[in-house]
Image (cartoon, helix red, strand yellow):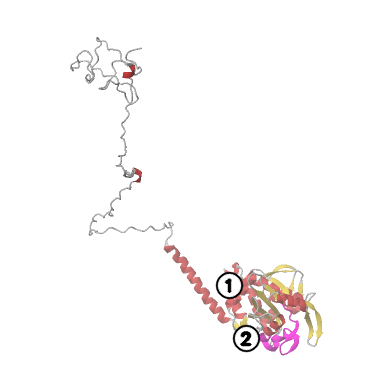
Amino acid sequence: MDSRGPSQHGDLPDDIARDSRGRPILDRFGRPVRRRRPSRGSSRPRPESGRHTRGSEPPRGSLPDRSVPSPRRDPAETRYTPRTPERASYARPTPPPGRPIQYRPEARPAPAYRREAPVPPPTQPPVRPERRGGGRRDFAPEPRSRQPRRRPGCSRGCMTPFLLIIGIVLTLTVVIGLWADAKLNRVEATPVQQVAKTAGTNWLLVGSDSRQGLTQDEIDVLGTGGDIGVGRTDTIMLLHYGRGSKPTLVSIPRDSYVNVPGYGMNKINSAFTFGGPQLLTETVEQATGLRIDHYAEIGFGGFAGLVDAVGGVEMCVTEAINDPLANINLPAGCQNLNGPEALGYVRSRAFAMGDLDRVSHQREFFSALMEKATNPTTLLNPFRLGPLISRASGTFTVGTGDHIWNLARLALAMRSGVVTETVPVGGFQDTAVGNVVLWDDAAARSLFGSLR
């Protein structure tokens, strides 16, 4: 093996660098470090030949004298042993005799991770530099509060036209509503003594056969005949609606044999002739046990005008109707009925059941009319909405406590769907007042009891 090659610490070559105690010097990887050879032409004096004494170290970079053989060393002496750092002894002092030993914890510095970080000094907000053409600001600007970002393309000015339009519409609605409410015909329809309050809201809807206010041309077109003075009720219907249930429309045959207060047993429509709307309302309340909250009446001319105002009403006629008394001749099938045709359809008795079939047609047509009047195609069309409000306010007769918004609530309630009923009939009878309709008392009490 070459003398310069690596070997064990016990047998190292002579060109290994050693410290003052003769131990080899190791690098960071634990390998012996060789001495540096002087470069050629160096003017440094060579060390004296021979081995240097212990305690003295040859100059750095000098080579050992090869002429003098070096004695063989004990491997135990040349083996490298790492230096162990000396540890300080923590021997506790012996206390004097007769005193107990007291141990006091030594104050050690807190670890670095537990030391509190120094608080930085408060920083002053930067001062804006002096502006050109103006005075210098000696105060710091206040920080701006963050505001939510708005969507680009619209600002508060975008809502101004919409708010203006909404305001105009609301104003026109209020003005038109007050104008229409002032045009309504009002009459006293509340009886002096009413029955106890019942659930829901009850309307008494009356179709009068009065010809008052019609011209001769209108009489000829409608086929109603001449003026008969104070008319009778051609249609009597009771509308009930409340929370959580569909409205119920009950037809009362005009020849129903009931007790008219102050006049005894008679046809129910005769109460209108004897005492007007007030006596008719009292008669209906005593016969049904329901408290009437609102009253609405319309005549022949107003009914035909109301149908024409909404553009006609589509009805499906099951069989052809040819009735000269009602001035009507309709084929079977679905068709749009105008004002005169609609009036003849609800007045005609040319059916197998006579008046009972007629009240059924009246309910169907009234429901279809309310649905057409509250349809968006009518409400959003000013050419239909204007005539509708004008005709309705000029032809309807209501109670003294009723208003145009009560009629609007009535129409909207019927638009959601109506349950149609007829007072249960027990038979017919000839009496001193003519042929009358007898109610089925048990079934009638059950029907009106469900509405209380």
Mark 2: secondary structure: loop
Q: Is residue 194 visible?
A: yes
- The three-letter amino acid code for the residue at tag 2 is Glu
Packing grade of label 1 (10 A; few <14, some 14-19, many >=20) is some
**244 part of magenta stretch:** no
- Label at residue 188: 2
Work out whether 103 lies above or below 157: above
Gap in Å between the C-alphas at discs 1 and 2?
29 Å
Residue at horizontal 39 percent and vertical 58 percent from the top: 147
Q: Quadrant of residue 161?
A: bottom left
Measured as percent of width and height from the top left, residue 256 is found at: 75, 81
Give the labeled residue for mark 1: 385
Q: Is residue 345 visible?
A: no
Measured as percent of width and height from the top left, residue 85 is found at: 31, 30
In front here: 235 or 125? 125
- The three-letter amino acid code for the residue at tag 1 is Leu
- Label at residue 241: none
Mark 1 or mark 2: name the one nearer the start of the chain: 2
Say which quadrant the N terminus sits in.
top left
Measured as percent of width and height from the top left, residue 83 is found at: 32, 27
Packing grade of label 2 (10 A; few <14, some 14-19, many >=20) is some
Q: Residue furthest bottom?
A: 262
Residues shaded magenta: 251-279
In front here: 265 or 370? 265
Q: With 373 as the anchor, is 155 left or right in this view?
A: left
**What number of labels is visible?**
2
In front here: 349 or 135? 135
